[in-house]
Image (cartoon, grey):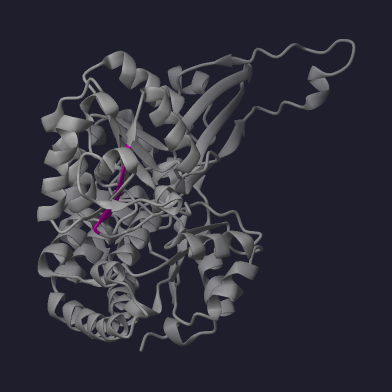
Amino acid sequence: MSEQLEKPTAEKVADAERAALSLAKCSDRMRSAALHEIADAIAANHDEILAANERDVAEAEELLEAGEYTQALVDRLKLSESKLESIEEMVRSVAGQDDPLGDTQTARALDDGLELYRVSVPIGVVGTIFESRPDALVQIAALCLRSGNAVILKGGSEASHSNRVLYELIEDATAGFAVDGDEETGDEDAGAHAAEEDAGDDDAADDDTAEDDAGDRHEADDELPDGWAQLIEARADVDTVLEMDDAIDLVMPRGSSEFVEYIQQNTHIPVLGHTEGVCHVYVDDAADLSMASDIAFDAKVQYPAVCNAVETVLVHEAVADEFLPEIAERYREADVEIRGDEQTRAIVDVAAASEEDWDTEYGDLIVAIRVVDSIDDAVDHVATYGSKHTDSIVTEDTGHARFFMRSLDSASVFHNASTRFADGFRYGLGAEVGISTGKIHARGPVGLEGLTTYQYYLEGDGQIVGTYAGADAKPFRHEDFDGEWRPGQLSSDRSG
């Protein structure tokens, strides 16, 4: 067993807090190369991972038969060769993303020789608590490493065997991993990843900025700190984590609405996440009905257990007679249970929808359908019952599309596209830690940018506030300029 796994939870969090300070200084090259090591470790250990996952699935299926688990949970739990290959691809995609750290967001001359920079930095220690999906552990760890954050990982007990194997592979792949000039240590293939990273930067090596690269990182630490990722396994330890607001900077829960609400109500740590994924597809009176059918079908059937699957389809009454029989037949062939309002049931033979159906996240092959009399009626329905996750309109009328998209408060609003696109990997973020339906800090799929904050760096030349105060106060310039922060260097010095 890993030495880290044997430690008490409070000690694990303390180790992560210490590691975060060093990880924030690790170079872009270091963090990216370490991710390739993780991908290699997963690729080399499919049999071990799948064997552990089979144990989890077998135990989950017993609880499914006993009525304690749902089929959706069991489906989310399963790994396969193809899914592991997708996980490897995701990790390498994250490694290939632009460095989210050290980005100069604003540069402002307060006066000659007094320059203020706002620069992106890691959040610090991110606590993540997630259910069912063992691939979430790898996604979260990869994003946190790439963004320079230490991470506390708490997976669901239903995936305990899978989570432990994946965590130990990540820990082993990055333990003692270091970059020193053109050489890396960690395993015999590590140098190849450094060469790959350098190959794409040949032009930059001849550029003046290459000389400043080390300076950008304040003598970057190029040995990955031990303890940057921690796994906690006992359910009782969740409350310990939630109480450690002095050490953990952000909590991101992924799971059922009841689970996320519990996290939100039992910690003083900022929580970023969503409680439900009640997503809608609205089929407008100006919709291409063939397109609408494909979108409504994909949004429900392609993967019904996830939070961006559609739960309610709204259909304009002008196209209901033509659209509903066709989509109902497609849903039936895919074993989708349909629950409709009175107008829907007058057109197709389906079960009656209750008031509760309109705000239910099924996470299963169940869909609610309602006929609406206008686009305003559709917007009102989404505003009343939606969860501000993802909603889509299918229409050829751009005015209708604009109205629908501007009228809703959801994190993602689509035009002529499946709600299933609401995903960090599909957005080009590499992966996602989770989905945020709030408005503060990050919104929608939370990728690398959502795992950063910023610091203000002020570069001066001996200035004091007294010069700018009193009767003879010197006025500030407050002029923005294009420039990158370089420690100890003023832009005027560089331009000279």
Specify whether 299 is left or right of 496.
left
Q: How many marks?
A: 0
Q: Residue at x 15, y 31 (%)?
A: 322
- Farthest-out residue, right: 471
Vertical order, 353 against 494 (above or below): below
Q: Nearer the viewer, residue 79 or 287?
A: 287
Quadrant into which the N terminus falls: bottom left
Image spot of residue 227 (x, y percent): 45, 72
- Which of the two residues, 37 or 401, is positioned nearer the viewer here? 401
Of helix, strand and loop, which mostly describes the magenta segment? strand
Q: Judge whether 480 appears above or below 71 on screen.
A: above
Query: At x 45% / y 53%, what residue is drawn?
Result: 356
Q: Farthest residue to the front: give it.
A: 346
Q: Nearer the viewer, residue 100 or 213?
A: 100
What is the x, y in percent for residue 432? 34, 51
Q: Position of residue 287 (x, y in %)?
A: 20, 24
Residue at horizontal 32 percent and vertical 18 percent from the top = 400
Asked whether 255 falls inside the magenta stretch, the response is no
User: Quick one: quadrant of the C terminus?
Assistant: top left
User: Foreground: 158 or 397?
Assistant: 397
Q: Is residue 167 visible?
A: yes
Where residue 33 sits, quadrant-wise, is bottom left
Whether residue 103 appears in this view of the structure is: no
57 versus 86 height, above or below: below
**Residue at (28, 66) in percent of width and height:** 72
Residue stretch in magenta: 365-370
Residue 350 drawn at (x, y percent): 24, 51
Quarter of the image holding residue 172? Answer: bottom left
Could you tell whether 3 is left or right of 460 in the image?
left
